[in-house]
Amino acid sequence: MRNRATLAALMTLAVLAQGRIFAMPPAGARSDARPLQLLESTGQGQAASPGGAVPTPTSRVTFRDAVDQAIQRNPTVQQASAEILRAEGLLRQVRSAILPTLSGSVLALTQSQGPAVFNGTPVTPREQVTGAMGLTAALFTPVLWAQRVQAQDALQVSQASAAEVRRQVALATAQAYLAVIARRRVFEANVRARDTSRAHFELAHQQRAAGAGSLLNELRAEQQLSANQVLVEQTSLEVYRAQEALGVLIGADGPVDTADEPVLQIPGSLDALRAAMPDTRTDVRLADRRQSAALRVWKDSWKDWLPSATGLFQPQYLQPSTIFQPSLSWRAQVAVSVPLFDAGLRSAARTEREALFNESRLVREAVLRQANSEVRTADESVKGADRTLAAARGAAEQARHVLDIVNVSFKAGAATEIEVIDAQRALLDAETSVAIAEDDLRQARLALLVALGRFPS
């Protein structure tokens, strides 16, 4: 397909945009973050201080508006629409070959010699004007009739292909939108970790200034603060990149931020939605159209052996008339063409068409099989992501309580600096895991909607 390369670039852009962000702790820190999912803001996020703020995009869009704008503005969708216009033009060309055609001609004749005369009547005048019209009509052309219906099938294939392109662009946009949300969640977790480590560093500095702490504790706290600041800067850039990717997909001239949390609910019974997939999934419908078109071309092969007939009616006006040609005359003719011998050309063409039909049938079966697999996989992913997110949130809440207890113990002298830093790192890992789990659940729900053919609705 002409749009395949562009679609591949779009999907690559979306995959890069929705890639998981694993905040990398400093060397020696634990890294047991697991993929997690759907989004309920904890309300504990703090605004990033200078040096860790995400650049403010020029615009914000809702999830629904982002998908709609991408479908309307994306160049790939516009190319698919142009293919529909091209198919319509080809259909009109084939149809015009079947309809009658009318042509006209005027011929002015001037000879160097005078008029030839026979018995006082001019035979060939010196100057003569001839006007003629020709009406041509296809009387019996089975091949052209078959090509007209095949062109209509090609138009339907183009329309189904455009719908599939819109689905892919919408999916890429949705993944980019969710990527912005996920990366911002990781960024907010790093901001909270940085602010917590800053408070710890200030406490360690105050304790050392009061003679109750040590330079080692203060340096360890400062090192943790610096490491968290690095993570804030890195994830701030990742958020900006995701916003830029979203802006490209929806046709904006700059980065675009998210304005809402998408609602990704399954509209009805899973079994009923799965049964309706052949009608709701654009890729299955496209495979159906291609199979039907290939079948018609193959079945119409017998028409290549039929004769064809065309008719011509041609009135003529001549001035001046001659002895052999009156002023007004007309003629009509019927031409019949019968194919007799073509050295096996038609038989070879039929074999090729049968092979193309078999290929399209196999492709359709593979697409439907893959669609059912995607539904089963997405359904299991949603269930697993729900459980993972619940566990991740529980772990984050527990890590938060542990950090509170360790901070109190540290102030009372019952905990060491290492315990505080470990608790801070554990909380950062847990909150990062929650952000990743939320994104996994969103992505799984989106994948299930796509697999069922319910996105974009």
Image (spheres, rainbow, N blue to C red):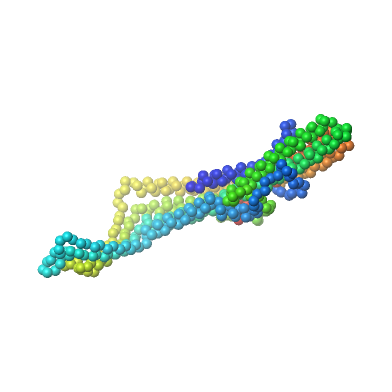
Q: Nearer the viewer, residue 185 or 236?
A: 236
Residue name at image x 76 percent, y 40 percent: 194
64 displayed left or right of 362: right
Q: Which of 358 and 383 is in front in this view?
A: 383
- Quarter of the picture containing the C terminus is bottom right
Residue 92 lies, in percent from the top left, at 42, 58
- Residue 398 visible in rendering: no
289 displayed left or right of 390: left
Residue name at image x 59 percent, y 48 percent: 248
Residue name at image x 79 percent, y 32 percent: 219
Q: Which of 67 and 196 is in front in this view?
A: 196
Q: Is residue 85 above or below residue 15?
A: below
Residue 103 lies, in percent from the top left, at 32, 62
- Residue 129 visible in rendering: yes
Residue name at image x 18 percent, y 61 percent: 111
Residue at the extreme left of the image, as rendered: 119
How many numbered marks appear?
0
Residue 52 lies, in percent from the top left, at 71, 42
Q: Quadrant of residue 212?
A: top right
267 displayed left or right of 365: right
